Image (spheres, rainbow, N blue to C red):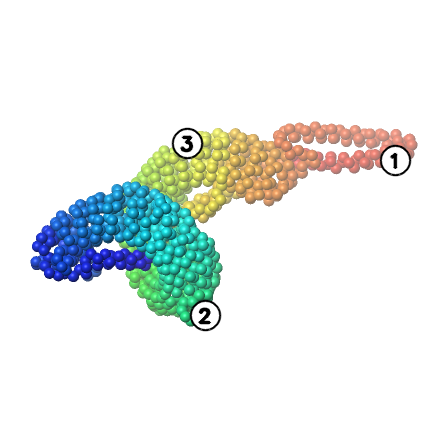
Amino acid sequence: MVRDSSLCIILSISILAWLSACDGNTPAGNCSESDREALIDFKNGLQDPYNGLSSWQGSNCCWWRGIGCDERTGGVISIDLRGDSGTYNYWELSGEIRPSLARLKSLRFLDLSSNDFVGVPIPEFVGSLENLRYLNLSCARFHGAIPPNLGNLSNLQYLDLSTSSYSLSINNLGWISGLGSLKYLALDSVDLSMVSSGWINVLNGFPSLSGLHLSNCGLSGSISLPSLVNFSSLAVLDLSFNSFDSVFPRWLVNVSSLVSVDMSDSGLYGRLPLGLGELPRLEILILSENDNLSASCTQLFQGSWKRIEVMDLAGNIIHGRLPTSVGKMTTLSYFDLSGNLIGGGVPSSMGSLCSLVYFDLSNNNLTGSLPEILQRGSETCDSHGLRGCLTSWMGQLKNLEKLMLDHNFLEGPIPSSLGNLKNLTYLGLRGNQLNGSLPVDVGQLSELDVFDVSFNYLSGTLSEEHFANLRKIVHLDLSSNSFTLNVSADWMPPFQVQHLGMGSCQIGLSFPAWLRYQNVINYLDFSNASISGPVPSWFWDISSHLSVVNMSLNRLQGQLSNPLPIALFAAVDLSSNLFHGLFPHPISEVILLELSNNQFSGGIPQNLSKYMLDLSFLVLSSNRLTGGLPESKGEMQSLRVINLANNNLSGSIPPSIGNCSSLEVLDLQNNSFSGLIPASLGQLQQLQSLHLSNNKLSGDLPSSFKNLWSLETLDTGNNQLNGTIPAWMAEGFIKLRILSLRSNAFSGEIPRELSSLSSLQVLDLAENNLTGSIPSSFGDLKAMVEGQARNEYLLYGNNGEVYYEENFLVTTKSQSQLYTKTLSLVTCMDISGNNLDGKFPEEITKLVGLLILNISRNGIGGQIPKSILGMSQLASLDLSSNRLSGAIPQSMPSLSFLSYLNLSDNNFSGKIPYTQQMTTFDHSSYYGNPGLCGAPLNVTCLANEPDKPGTIEDSGGDDEFIDQWFYLSIGLGYAVGILVPAVVLHMKSSWAYAYFDFIDRIVGRWLPLGNKRAKIQRNRRRGRR
């Protein structure tokens, strides 16, 4: 509809030019013999397969088809042989354009557009037709450079050389300056990429120019003008689909004659000048898909916009809330602000836009509920005003045909007043937060052909009344809600849909019988619909029309029809059901086949490529398939995803898979494949995810893998691979996120070059035979230093319907946990179960974004660095079964996210810093460290137990020395305590009282301390045993 408005303006100009050129085009008298002979020669050069020039015979050429003559002289003044692609009158010319046309000295009008002069250049003699005022050679498939001598046509007012495929080109626009009378210029899709940046200044010299069309010409650079703007007559300006990379031309606000401006998708940026709203004649403004044009809604729509009918600002940075002044644009019929940053609600003044036919605010940040948006208007649509309830107000928008509010944040129920929009043909509310039930009034929208409320929070029961008058509906999508369909067993829907989406709706316990009558359906989504039982045989009668069928996540059972009747190049998803039997092959080519999580058995057909040569997505995981992989897979070069995980497949991996040059995912994990990894896999330069874990593969990692520059996940864990970890990984895997070589037989040292893998989030080298020390350069692993603050779904092979979701088993807390949707947030280093030694590298503590660290079951010594406090995101730390010693750092209780800690079986000593986060761990975290004391261990520390580092032997020697003197003092005290009282008793009684008082105080002070130390010593000796 937007383009139609522009065409109306163009057509008006064309008609004026035609009338001016032909003076009515009324044939009179006989044409001259020389003109007739010139036309006959011109015809002889043409090919006319549809006999459109059959009338070109006889002496009076003025009566021939497409020929116009001057009333007074009889001279040929017009040739209109434009091609006709109409249903009943199709015809087009081809062949050559003979120079005999140049003999038509009175020719003013020449139209050869929409013909098929493929490969023929525009003849240079056209530049000699000095009386020509109208020249239209558009869309006639002419080829080559446009002759510059067209600049000799000084009387030319209308020039259209537009193409559809860059078949014509101009390197210099200088010759156009000779067209002093030019009023209309159209060069759409003519290659102007070599034209200098001064082209706009050349055209600025045509004050009479009223129409300028340079769409899709490959223009670039700035489109600014000097202060003097000569476009005083310019009404239509089309510069769409270029690559200017220019600030928006502010000089447009000075061209008061503008009626239509189309600069969509042209690489413009900057703020829109507010003066656009004050252009007195502007009716059409199309600036969509520039991405970086910005404006405040409040300021932009304060303008007058007196005649605006079409406004398309989609795909930019229009921001803020829509002001009430938007209701002043009462002439507006087409309003598209989709794909911007508009927030808040839609003002009630929108109710005054009674001419509105097309309204699109999808993909914004709108909030509030639909009743708030569609509330009673404050303006009037007729002389009676907008009064009454919401329903009566909605009925005033009688012209509205398309309403699109998809992908916002709208909430609340859908108002029943929508049922009053009787002309509505398109209602899009997809991807909001709407709730409540679907009003039955929607079923009264008899003109509706598209209805999409998918991906909301709607619920309730849908009855036959909801669909009563939806006879014209062709696209119905209710999926990803919580509807329950309640219709009779013999219900016959009033519609014949092409697109039917009911995923996550409760359709019924058995397969819906009413689907049998949908004869034109080509898209079917019944996923997660609580359907069980077998698929009825009649379904295979309509399935041959289906280009998309998704019946996943149900309890459908039985065997599929084999071969499987499906439309050509269809996408089939029958995953997560109870289907069994042999692998079904489609009757025609398919592009997607998803049969995972079923019970299919047997082998994969060896001639798979015969049935699915163009297949791009093959998922057969989690079935009971046996046998080997067919060599023919290498012939399926369109494959982007192969997922055969969790089956019983065996044999070797065929090298022919290396020929699948489009492959992005190869998942063969959890099978019984054996032999070497084919070196040919290194040819898969588009490969992003490679899972080969839990098989019986052996040998080295092929050196050809260094060519896998797109690889993000490499998982070869739990195989029998050996050799050293190659240092070339750092050079080849520049995008690698996940590297797992776990549970193989790799040996040698860990290459320090791995630290240059700047995207590496997960490094799992556990359970190998690695030796040497932990590279200190691991502290430079960028992704583990920075952490992952934003979740990013790792989806590969996405074709719009299904995708491969990356998955990985992370071992933490002595358990394996499968990560999928949040995998991009995981940072993990696991090098446990090797033969590593050396000290705990302090550089590791620079990994402040690391969540999981496991270096257990090695021979690593030294102490835990105090700088471990910097690893503030650490959630799991396992240092068990090493030779670490010294005190546990006092800073560790500050690791507030730590939920798992294992320091057991080391040589730690001193008091456990049992505060803050450390109080969440029990005694099992510290087993096997005989030098540790304090909670949560049942070992009491001495009152002056040092927290400083020390060895068990040193600490034990000091304790024994102190204990010897303690017990000696007890012995001496006992002897003195016996002898002295005996003497004193025979002496003065007052001395006896003083002595026993002194002994009481000494015993009261030292006896508890002696008992405490003795207890500690006994416990330690038990620990050594």
C-beta proximity under 8 Å, tags 3 and 1: no
Image location (x, y in percent) of residue 560: 33, 56
Quick one: which residue is furthest to the right in this view? 988
Q: What residue appears at the point 39 percent right and 58 percent down from the top-left corner?
A: 305
Marks 2/3: CA–CA distance = 78 Å
* Residue matched to label 2: 387
Disc with the residue nearer the chain's start (2 vs 3): 2
Quarter holding residue 1012: top right
Image location (x, y in percent) of residue 384: 42, 71
Mark 3 falls on what kind of element? Answer: loop
Q: What residue appears at the point 16 percent right and 55 percent down from the top-left corner?
A: 77
The residue closer to the viewer here, 804 or 155, is 155
The residue closer to the viewer here, 77 or 360, is 77
Disc with the residue nearer the chain's start (1 vs 2): 2
* Residue matched to label 1: 993
C-beta proximity under 8 Å, tags 2 and 3: no
Question: Split into 4 quadrants, where in the image is the N terminus?
Answer: bottom left
Q: In this view, does 196 lie to the left or right of 97?
A: right
Quarter holding residue 528: bottom left
Please determine whether, in this image, residue 998 is positioned above or below residue 51: above
Mark 1 falls on what kind of element? Answer: helix
Mark 2 falls on what kind of element? Answer: loop
The residue closer to the viewer here, 374 or 818, is 374
Please determine whether, in this image, residue 591 is positioned above or below residue 842: below
* Residue matched to label 3: 727
Q: Which amino acid does label 2 sit on?
A: Arg
Marks 1/2: CA–CA distance = 110 Å
Q: Which amino acid does label 3 sit on?
A: Ala
